[in-house]
Amino acid sequence: MTQTLSATEGSRNSTGDYARIEKAITFLREHHLEQPELADVARQVHLSEFHFQRLFSRWAVISPKRCLQFLTLQHARQLLADSKPLLEASLDSGLFGPSRLHDLFVSIEGVTPGEFKKRGTGLEIPYGIHPTRFGLCLLATTPRGVCWLSFVTDGDQQAAVTELREHLAGAVVRADPAAIGQLAERIFSRRAAAPPTPLNLLVAGTNWQIKVWEALLRIPPGAVTTYGDLAARLGVETGARAVGNAVAKNPIAYLIPCHRVIRESGVIGDYRWGTDRKRAMLAWESSQR
């Protein structure tokens, strides 16, 4: 009799556990673009984070975080399958379109060889650190355009400023958040500029690097491409590694969207300012599409 009751109770518990897991997986599938935290999912099934983590891992054999990663990867692969027509549509319509980055028209202006050699000598460059939906960003500008945009990693603002100073070793780099605040708001605000006005970027790089960065601007929000595909579009069929090196040297994150390049396998891959941040950017852009 005791064994019968135990089996019945076990069956009820199993049924209840399955219902919770099913609800959790459904929630993850429907909200993976938002990258929900463990607490968010646990709340949906009325469990503590600890008990939900243990229950999910026992039933699904993988952790909730790993499940979320699989869903994100599946989405990335779908984006990859869709990227060619989206890229072609972007090329046909220029850089404008209803899904263009907050309706900003972004253009690149490369420095001259002489300016490149000077490394900003004689320039006074203001910068500011500002909150964005993707974490703190460090933004710097010149009269000719934005020259730097990076993200603060591990909360180390000083390291971010040091990297900027090393990039522009000859310039006078000074903190002026008030002067930069309006520009940061324009770049990251959900409100579109109306009418859209050009946003100029001033970059220092080799001809090849600038060519790659210009190609990145043609990848529309919500789409991804691979290093190999990008190389092929630039007429260098075996140039995936060279493309990867140029992408890694991108001095203006987000506006020059190097986060939209992923590996041939569909894996998100590394990102200079953190893989989780790259995943969040792709998910957010996809949700806006």
Image (cartoon, rainbow, N blue to C red):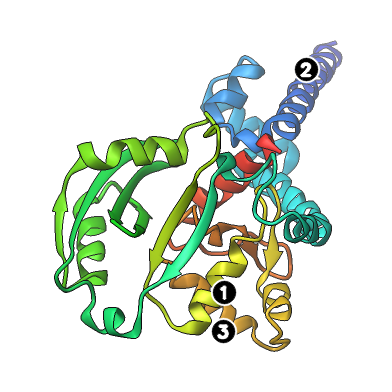
Comparing labels 3 and 2, the label whose residue is closer to the camera: 3
Q: Position of residue 115 (x, y in %)?
A: 28, 78
Q: Residues within 10 Å of mark 3 (few under 14, many from 20)?
A: some
Q: Residues within 10 Å of mark 1 (few under 14, many from 20)?
A: many
In the displayed structure image, the side of residue 54 where residue 232 appears, left or right: right
The residues bearing labels 1 and 2 have C-alpha atoms spaced at a distance of 53 Å
Identify the mark nearer the N-term, 3 or 2.
2
In the displayed structure image, the side of residue 118 where residue 74 appears, left or right: right
Identify the mark nearer the N-term, 1 or 2.
2
The residues bearing labels 1 and 3 have C-alpha atoms spaced at a distance of 9 Å
Kindly identify the residue that appears in the image at 43 percent across and 37 percent down.
Answer: 186
Which residue is identified by label 3?
A: 242
Which residue is identified by label 1?
A: 212
Report which quarter residue 10 is drawn in.
top right
Kindly identify the residue that appears in the image at 76 percent across and 23 percent down.
Answer: 23
Q: In the rendered structure, which amino acid carries the disc numbered 1?
A: Val
Q: Which mark is residue 16?
A: 2
